[in-house]
Amino acid sequence: MIPTGPKDFQDACSTMQVPQKGVFFTSIGSQDVMLARNAAGDIVAFSGFCTHSMGRLEGGPVEGDEIICPHHGARFNFRTGQAKTSCPNLPKFEVKVEGRRVLVRPAR
Ligand code: FES
């Protein structure tokens, strides 16, 4: 395998792992990645770290289209990354699908 740098797309998961409703978490290196589907059903990826205080969002409860940070309760729309509280929106990562694999370009 050719070594990849942080600017490259990296294999994140199978398309089957990303639910129609809800979220799927994985990691690429030290970057937590939260994957979901937008309103059109396309796969989207965001940082898995809360913008309030960088807590991990994984394990937070999901209500409707929102994930709630398990640390202090910040809410984010998991289809858009939009914050529903006073925090910044979740950073969005580029996604491309090749066959059944989801590739994500994490933060630089
Ligand atoms: S770290 Fe998420 S609400 Fe504080």
Image (cartoon, rainbow, N blue to C red):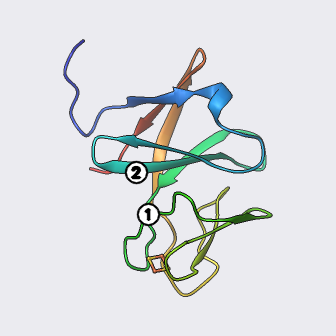
Pick the residue in front: 60 or 4.
Answer: 60
- Residue at 59 percent of width and 14 percent of height: 99
Image position, residue 89 (x, y; %): 52, 71
Q: Quadrant of residue 67?
A: bottom right
* Residue 108 horizontal side relative to residue 91, left or right: left
Q: Which residue is mark 2?
A: 32
Instruction: State the separation of the CA atoms marked 2 and 1.
Output: 8 Å
Q: Which residue is mark 1?
A: 56
Whether 70 is drawn above or below 45: the answer is: below
Q: Is mark 2 within 8 Å of ligand 1?
A: no
Image position, residue 92 (x, y; %): 48, 55
Q: Hey, what amino acid is under mark 2?
A: Asp
Q: Secondary structure at mark 2?
A: strand
Q: Hey, what amino acid is under mark 1?
A: Arg
Q: Mark on residue 85?
A: none
- Residue at 64 percent of width and 49 percent of height: 23
Q: Quadrant of residue 41?
A: top right
Pick whichever of labels 2 and 1 is earlier in the sequence.
2
Q: Are marks 2 and 1 in contact (CB under 8 Å)?
A: yes
Image position, residue 42 (x, y; %): 69, 38
Whether 38 is drawn above or below 2: the answer is: below
- Residue at 19 percent of width and 22 percent of height: 3
Pick the residue in front: 104 or 12.
Answer: 12
